[in-house]
Amino acid sequence: MLQLKTDKYIMALGDVNPDMVLPYGESKAALEAVARGEKAPTDRSLRAKMYSGGSIGNTASGLARLGMKTFFAGSAGKDAFSDFLTKEFEEDGVDCKYFARKEGLFTCLVTAVVGADKERILYCWPTSNAAHHQLLPEDLPDSAIDEIGWVHTSGIMLRENPAAETIVSFLEKCRKKGVTVSFDLNLRLEAVGLSDEFASRIRRAVDCANVLFGSGVEELMPLSGLDTPEAAAKSFVRDDRIVVSRSGKYGLSLYSAEEEFYCPTFDAEVVDTIGAGDAFNAGFIAAAALGKSLWDCATWGNGAATYALQYVGARQCPKRDVLEKYIKEMPILHVKD
């Protein structure tokens, strides 16, 4: 049976960036109201707001909030943005020992323009050679492997070198040393497709993974070439690998060599979906590293994600006591097939 419990550090390896949110729709409506002679708003709701973001950065934050010893490993520019990100990490309890901040590089900035309908259009800058893709092998020394019991990363980091090859090679070293590897596919095929080079890196990362996270329909099916989420997920199961097939509000299905089950999620009002999947990963990994059952891991993941959905911002994973209370008190969401 696959053993996931560890007392060592968990390393969250990958991207981090500031999220700049611009309330365009509300600001436009306020300007139009002023033009009609109405009083201008006096609160701060129409100002630009900065949050910490990045899929792996969000998961690192969530793990630390849940009481896990957590490293963030990644690359950023040595600038005011990475100062902000480092401060946010440290406030959550994340160890930044392997956060490489580099002169002459730009930390990636994600700008979200929010319309009157609350829908977001995202813009990333710089569009190439951003600092998070400049992670080098020397930023991840082999000595780090001896400090960790688990490493988690995401497919979002496997599109551009040198970070892509650096990360996959590090995962392969971790696997050989017996470090648990979790991998969130995070393919985003609707935006950028699946090139042969990217697919090759994804398959190398999957081969290292003891825990594989992915959307059943949007990721596991395209990657496997099979025509149902169940068949696709099962095709990736090994004696030393579990597969978590997620389906949004419909919960998840988990498959392993010993068991498989469906786990529904919780009923809650959705305010902001950004970062919910990252909170799920944090909840699942934390429970697994604590030695909990796979059912409890799934429940912690669903609970952390649903909790985060109720608040604005990508880093809304609750602390452990809050999550445990939330899971006990929240109703299960019953949905039709």
Image (tube, rainbow, N blue to C red):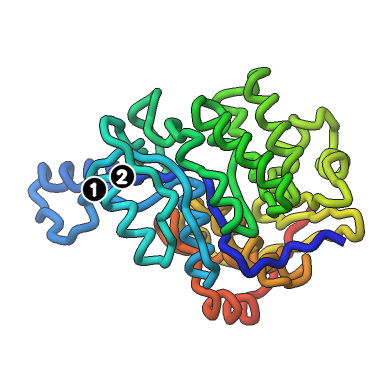
Residue at image mark 1: 48
Residue at the outermost top position: 196
| 1 or 2: mark nearer the eye | 2
Q: Which mark is residue 118?
A: none
> In the image, is residue 328 above or below residue 335?
below
In this rendered view, identify the residue nearer to me: 117 or 167: 167
Residue at point 40% right, 58% down? 312
**Residue extending furthest toward the right:** 258
Query: What amino acid is at disc 2?
Result: Met
Identified at 70% across, 36% down, the residue is: 219
Marks 1 and 2 in Cβ contact (< 8 Å): yes
Image quadrant of residue 10? bottom right
* 55 to 318, vertically: above or below: above
Residue 120 sits in quarter: top left
Q: Is residue 85 left or right of 155 when viewed as pictured? A: left
What residue is pinned by disc 2? 20
Residue type at mark 1 is Ala
Q: CA distance from mark 1 to mark 2?
A: 7 Å
What residue is drawn where x is 33% and y is 42%?
101
Mark 1 falls on what kind of element?
Answer: loop
- Residue that appears at 73% across and 52% down: 178
